[in-house]
């Protein structure tokens, strides 16, 4: 009965969901493209497989899926890869990563109504499906089981907060997760929480994000960008969220006025959501800073030093470049209670990390990075700037943190191999 009620609620909400696409398209026109796919209409796409299906809702999940997708393409040369998303930015990221791979096809996942899910599964009928991290849709999961499609939750994470919310549904939650062929958890803590929900088919395979390797060209371009700052120290504020930028800019202003042993530092500010780029650029200007936008720069032919107080990273798919251009990186979503973002990519390129008090979405990785010496936790924006000033004015300490960050990232690799082994058993290979 609960599943029927859920489906009825979805049916009632469907017009609202479609209107929401129109609303969001005001800032991100991509939301009005391929709308038919969200309603299970795929006749314009080739159906010939066999297909392996990976669902990555948005940018972070798509990037995390990269090593798995590359491994699947190599391990199953006779299969094609269906990559589904829910956001235009996720789809754009997938196109950047795999647009030149003829065996990869991208589309949107349909809304979670039984008949829309059935259309999707009938059209492609994948040999196996993989949902990234936290993307659990009850009708999709049940529909896959009924269609004989083994479905896995891969790189799965379940924070204590999410566990408490999910546990309220008791046996209903357990029944939903039991429809998965397997849950491949990032950490022992995630696995314990899944087990506590009554999920039995749980394996610990690790975090795929540790297996992400930045493109050498991106790191090289980051080096070019770093050179343009000259002797100025560069602090990146990456994946910042609404409400964080004012706090950061206020504290950064005081840092510039005080000066000290870090002469005129530069802030490389990268908002998480592209629809906020213009808003944040205006915010920086109102705060009295000079600002230079990445979109107006030719990184490969920088002919003059960067003198702006703030460089706005208003581009997609270049986070590795931004980290490589920085001496120290703050990871956003952690000054306010949003749970933080992925710090692994910064550590991989050897840029040590600062995080705020709220990192519950990436608790294990953050705690491990702190224990390894590649990350420091700060209490608020003022503490962030104070800590950054102390680290950046101490070359020996900064070099030590760089080495620890790289070591931390290297020690946790191997999730792709373990995930592939679990999938191979389901595929009978």
Image (cartoon, rainbow, N blue to C red):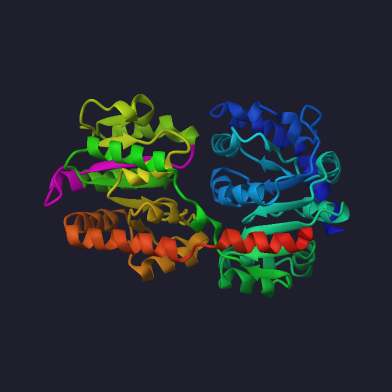
Left-right relation of 302 to 136: left
Q: Tell me where residue 17 appears, x and y as whole percent.
A: 70, 37
Q: Image height check: is 251 above or below 364?
A: above
| Residue appearing at x 74%, y 52% in the figure | 129
Question: Is residue 374 at all visible to an observer of this figure?
Answer: no
Q: Is 264 inside the magenta-drawn segment? A: yes
Q: Image height check: is 396 above or below 281?
A: below
Q: Tell me where residue 205 appears, x and y as whole percent.
A: 60, 66
Question: Quadrant of residue 306 in the image?
Answer: top left
Q: Tell me where residue 159 appears, x and y as whole percent.
A: 57, 64
Depth check, front residue: 13 or 228: 228
| Quadrant (top left/top right/bottom left/bottom right) for the N terminus | bottom right
Point out the stretch of residues depicted in magenta: 255-273
Left-right relation of 345 to 181: left
Depth check, front residue: 50 or 345: 50
Left-right relation of 290 to 132: left
| Residue appearing at x 82%, y 40% in the figure | 116
Left-right relation of 189 to 53: left
Question: Quadrant of residue 425 in the image?
Answer: bottom right
| Residue appearing at x 35%, y 24% in the figure | 296
Q: Is 366 inside the magenta-drawn segment? A: no
């Amino acid at each position: 009965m609960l599943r029927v009620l859920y489906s009825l609620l979805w049916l009632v909400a469907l017009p609202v969901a479609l209107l929401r696409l129109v609303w969001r398209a005001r800032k991100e026109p991509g939301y009005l493209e391929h709308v038919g796919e969200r309603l299970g209409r795929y006749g314009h796409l080739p159906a010939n497989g066999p297909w392996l299906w990976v669902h990555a809702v948005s940018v972070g999940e798509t990037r995390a899926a990269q090593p798995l997708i590359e491994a699947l393409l190599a391990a199953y040369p006779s299969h094609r890869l269906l990559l589904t998303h829910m956001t235009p930015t996720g789809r754009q990221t997938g196109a950047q990563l795999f647009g030149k791979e003829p065996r990869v096809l991208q589309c949107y996942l349909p809304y979670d109504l039984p008949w829309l899910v059935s259309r999707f599964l009938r059209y492609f009928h994948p040999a196996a499906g993989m949902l990234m991290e936290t993307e659990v849709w009850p009708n999709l999961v049940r529909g896959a089981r009924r269609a004989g499609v083994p479905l896995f939750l891969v790189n799965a994470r379940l924070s204590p907060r999410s566990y408490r919310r999910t546990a309220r549904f008791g046996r209903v939650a357990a029944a939903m997760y039991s429809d998965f062929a397997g849950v491949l958890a990032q950490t022992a803590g995630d696995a314990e929480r899944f087990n506590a929900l009554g999920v039995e088919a749980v394996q610990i395979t690790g975090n795929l994000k540790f297996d992400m390797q930045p493109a050498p060209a991106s790191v090289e371009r980051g080096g070019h960008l770093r050179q343009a700052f000259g002797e100025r120290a560069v602090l990146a504020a990456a994946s910042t969220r609404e409400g964080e930028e004012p706090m950061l800019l206020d504290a950064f202003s005081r840092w510039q006025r005080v000066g000290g042993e870090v002469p005129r530092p530069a802030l490389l500010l990268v908002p998480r959501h592209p629809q906020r780029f213009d808003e944040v650029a205006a915010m920086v200007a109102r705060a009295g800073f000079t600002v230079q936008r990445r979109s107006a720069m030719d990184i490969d032919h920088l002919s003059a030093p960067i003198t702006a107080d703030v460089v706005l990273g208003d581009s997609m798919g270049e986070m590795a470049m931004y980290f490589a251009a920085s001496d120290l990186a703050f990871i956003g979503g952690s000054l306010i209670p949003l749970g933080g973002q992925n710090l692994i990519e910064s550590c991989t390129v050897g840029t040590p990390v600062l995080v705020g008090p709220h990192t519950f979405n990436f608790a294990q990785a953050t705690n491990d990075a702190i224990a390894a010496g590649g990350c420091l936790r700060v209490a608020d924006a003022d503490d962030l700037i104070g800590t950054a000033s102390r680290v950046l004015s101490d070359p020996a300490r900064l070099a030590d943190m760089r080495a620890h960050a790289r070591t931390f990232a290297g020690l946790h690799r191997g999730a792709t191999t373990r995930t592939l082994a679990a999938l191979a058993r389901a595929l009978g290979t």
